[in-house]
Amino acid sequence: MSSAPAEAASANVSISELILQIRSGQRQSLGELLQLYRNYLNVLATTQLDARLRRRMSTSDLVQETMLAAHRDFDQFRGGSEGELLAWLRQILSHHLSHAIERNVYAQKRDIRRVVSLDRVAKRIDDSIAGLSNLLPDPMATPSEIASRRELATELSDQLAKLKTRYHDVIVYRNLQGYSFDEIAEKMDIKPGAARMLWLRAIAKFKEICDINIAGDLS
């Protein structure tokens, strides 16, 4: 399957080389580079916002804030690889998410015990990365292989974005957020049995699009 980052490097220019070009003065390419990871950031943001938070902030706004901050502060990025860029983007996302939660949810409750922990938010985002990686078959073990799987999460995010909304949502709920079919049914206003069948159809469609095997619990 093809990926957006690979398409960006179609002219034999890798992501690492593109980063070097931007640093050398070709800033016009920065927006295009960051745009490659919009779907990836959207999936991560979606997994972090429950119904209560979505009443106060939107996933698209959170992702847009992250993209604007990354564009503005790119000179602070010290890495050179796609993996390092992804880690940096996740850090920015967790920072904005943490402050958005504190600003929107706890604005009237200044108890210091309620201040959102940035480390806790970052941990939840890392868990979401693991959930994306688990959509791939044959878990890997070495650090380099784990890093590769994290980078492949961007590709999975692009593939998820191709699905219709209900298929996208049920996969996010089940595979990335770990909800039961009863919980999914409540969120999507359908019967538990219908939720399970919707998930099965979504997984089948996702496999068709991606041409990969999906690891998922059918129970």
Image: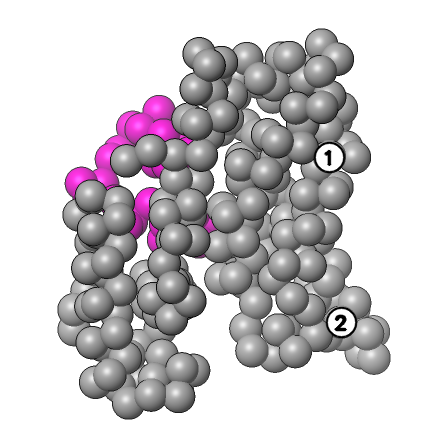
Residue at position x 75%, y 41% in the image: 69
Quadrant of the rendering where the C terminus is positioned: bottom left
Residue toward you, 130 or 22: 22
What range is drawn magenta here? 125-152
Where in the figure is residue 104, as x and y percent of width and height?
A: 76, 71
Q: Name which quarter of the figure residue 30 lies in.
A: top right
Which label was assigned to residue 71? 1
**Residue 11 spot, x, y in % from top left:** 46, 14
Coordinates of residue 42 in the picture (x, y in percent): 54, 53
Three-letter residue code for mark 2: Asn
Hey, what amino acid is under mark 1? Answer: His
Horizontal relation, residue 101 to residue 212: left or right: right
- For residue 118, say whether it is visible: no
Mark 1 neighbour class, 10 Å CA radius: few under 14, some 14 to 19, many 20 or more: some
Q: Does residue 165 appear anywhere in the picture?
A: yes
Which residue is found at the position 57% from the left and 67% from the top? 49
Element carrying mark 2: helix
